[in-house]
Image (cartoon, helix red, strand yellow):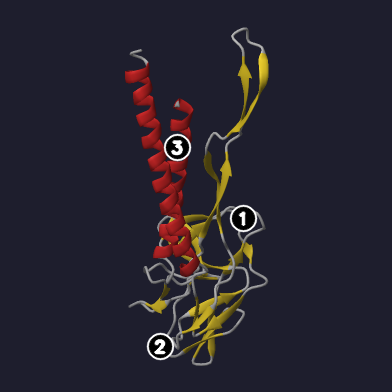
């Protein structure tokens, strides 16, 4: 019975974690350049039960019993989202693997969200106001209509003014979310396979329809584990108060 409590508790904790991951993905379903988190669930090792005499001799197998489940790993899905036309000249999308570089108070961060704008000083900034980095530092745009080429070169009034710093990471690099749709990691290298598409944004790669289905399934699993804990608690209570009295 005690083992049943631990099994139910592990399932409850697992589904709470999954609900948090799915809820965050769902909240960012319309965030440009957002990359969904994907969870991998695994079961704990099973126990093989045997029937044993008072003498300690095994007289037969009862069978395996599960010991619960947990979150094996949480990974970032970097698959490309579809492109959305916006007709805004400073909306930029990356096609292929790579990231824009952004200067924040905590250091350089990386993003696929290309919803940029000019601030009052003419700097190219993110939606949160962080400067977007070019190959020589923050980018300042003069007055005029910007034209962004696929290689990241920005021209205004037919004059090149900067080139976007496009970076990528070796396969297997762990990228961590830091908030504001930004990522951090070590080992950035120039992105050789990415191209820039102007007047477009990359949509989130999270599918809200499948996400809602997974969210409801996790919610039902949470309720099931909650009920399992209640049953185990009631059984333990009877064992202590009723059977123990006999």
At x 57%, y 61%, the residue is 77
Q: Quadrant of residue 56?
A: top right
Q: Secondary structure at mark 2?
A: loop
Count the numbered circles shown: 3
Q: Quadrant of residue 165?
A: bottom right
How much space separates mark 3 and mark 1, taking CA atoms? 42 Å
Q: In the orientation shown, which residue stands out farthest toward the front?
A: 246
At x 62%, y 54%, the residue is 173
Q: Which mark is residue 143?
A: 2
Residue 106 position in % (x across, y down): 43, 55
The front one of 122 and 116 is 116
At x 34%, y 25%, the residue is 237
Indicate whether 43 appears above or below 215: above
At x 32%, y 19%, the residue is 241
Q: Secondary structure at mark 3?
A: helix
Q: Earlier in the sequence, mark 1 or mark 2?
A: 2
Q: Which is more foreground, mark 3 or mark 2? A: 3
Task: State left or right for residue 223 relative to residue 81.
Answer: left
Residue neighbourhood size for the residue with mark 2, other residues' Cα within 10 Å, grouped as few (<14), some (14–19), many (≥20)? few
Residue 85 position in % (x across, y down): 49, 85
Q: Secondary structure at mark 1?
A: loop
Q: Which mark is residue 187?
A: 1
Q: Identify the residue under disc 3.
A: 8
Residue neighbourhood size for the residue with mark 3, other residues' Cα within 10 Å, grouped as few (<14), some (14–19), many (≥20)? many
Q: Earlier in the sequence, mark 3 or mark 1?
A: 3
Indicate whether 18 appears above or below 31: above
Q: Earlier in the sequence, mark 3 or mark 2?
A: 3
Disc 3 vs disc 1: Cβ atoms closer than 8 Å? no
How much space separates mark 1 and mark 2, taking CA atoms? 35 Å
The front one of 92 and 103 is 92
Residue 133 position in % (x across, y down): 50, 69
Q: Which is more foreground, mark 3 or mark 1? A: 3
């Amino acid at each position: 019975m005690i083992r049943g409590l631990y099994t139910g508790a592990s399932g409850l904790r697992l589904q709470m974690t999954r609900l948090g991951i799915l809820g965050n993905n769902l909240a960012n379903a319309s965030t440009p350049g957002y990359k969904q988190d994907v969870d991998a669930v695994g079961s704990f090792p099973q126990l093989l039960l045997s029937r044993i005499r008072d003498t300690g001799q095994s007289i037969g197998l009862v069978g395996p019993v599960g010991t619960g489940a947990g979150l094996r790993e949480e990974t970032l899905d970097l698959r490309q989202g579809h492109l959305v036309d916006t007709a805004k000249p400073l909306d930029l999308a990356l096609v292929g693997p790579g990231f824009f570089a952004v200067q924040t108070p905590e250091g350089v961060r990386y993003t696929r969200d290309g919803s940029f704008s000019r601030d009052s000083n003419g700097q190219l900034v993110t939606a949160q106001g962080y400067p977007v980095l070019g190959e020589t530092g923050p980018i300042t745009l003069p007055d005029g209509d910007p034209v962004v080429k696929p290689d990241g070169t920005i021209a205004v009034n037919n004059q090149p003014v900067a080139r976007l710093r496009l970076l990528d990471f070796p396969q297997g690099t762990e990228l961590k979310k830091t908030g504001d749709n930004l990522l951090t990691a070590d080992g950035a290298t120039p992105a050789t396979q990415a191209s820039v598409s102007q007047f477009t944004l990359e949509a989130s790669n999270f599918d809200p329809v499948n996400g809602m289905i997974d969210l409801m399934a996790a919610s039902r699993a949470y309720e099931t584990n909650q009920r399992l804990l209640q049953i185990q608690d009631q059984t333990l209570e009877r064992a202590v108060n009723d059977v123990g009295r006999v």
